[in-house]
Image (spheres, grey):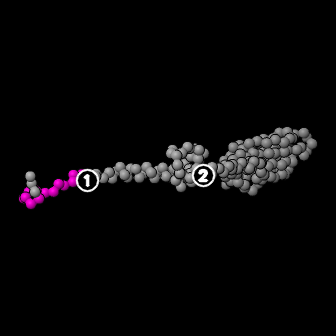
Amino acid sequence: MSTPTQPGWAPPQPPTTPPRKRHVGRNIALAVVGLFILGGVISAINGGGTTAPSAITSAPAATEGPTSPSATTVAEAPAATAAPATTTKPAPKHWTNVISVSGSSDKRTPAFTLHDGRARLRYTFTDSAGYGMVVGAVYVLAEGTSLAADGGIPEVMVSAPGSDSTELAQGPGRYYLDISAANARWTVTIQELR
């Protein structure tokens, strides 16, 4: 039997356990998942997120006993109410006069501007000579052009007294009217739908 005084004898050593391996990657992943869950709970409390607040408040407790303060906060959070969406209807458009002229003979008007949108020409020709017929033509020409030099096709040709209107196909830009008339009093108006 060995005694403590004998050489080579050592007291028994407790069993050694290998050092714990650190799972840094797993701990980081768990922390990230925890942050996502916490963010979802905070978002649901503030009325955002994809989980309805009523689903959070009505979820049964997983365990019996006292609840943590954060669970109490989630359960007591008021249901978020969304503000009603306000939609503004565009104002109804009306025909607005751009230029209106009248006369009893040939006339050219000052230039006017057409914008991007619908435009129309309204006209009235009355018999001023008592013959029961009138002669008239209304041209809508681009500013800087001349009917005599550049020619043109009339928007309206009138051969009998009366009133009517026609849609214009001109695009946005500056225009003027060149009106020819005989045996007539006339009124011509350009309107835009604004």
**Which secondary structure class fits the magenta region best?**
loop
Locate residue 32, reporting x and y percent.
Answer: 42, 51
The foreground one among 131 and 171 is 171
Locate residue 63, reporting x and y percent.
Answer: 50, 45
Residue hosting label 2: 76
Q: Give the crowd class for mark 2: few <14, some 14-19, many >=20 residues within 10 Å.
A: few
Check residue 160 in the rendering and tell me which mark sits there, or answer none. none
Residue at (84, 42) in percent of width and height: 163
What's drawn in magenta, residue-wise? 4-18
Judged from the image, the secondary structure of the residue bearing numbered disc 2 is helix
Residue at (41, 52) in percent of width and height: 31
Locate residue 22, reporting x and y percent.
Answer: 30, 53
Q: Is residue 178 visible?
A: no
Check residue 19 in the rendering and tell me which mark sits there, or answer none. 1
**Of marks 2 and 1, which one's residue comes earlier in the chain?**
1
Q: Inspect the image, locate mark 2, and give the three-letter code of the amino acid beneath it.
A: Glu
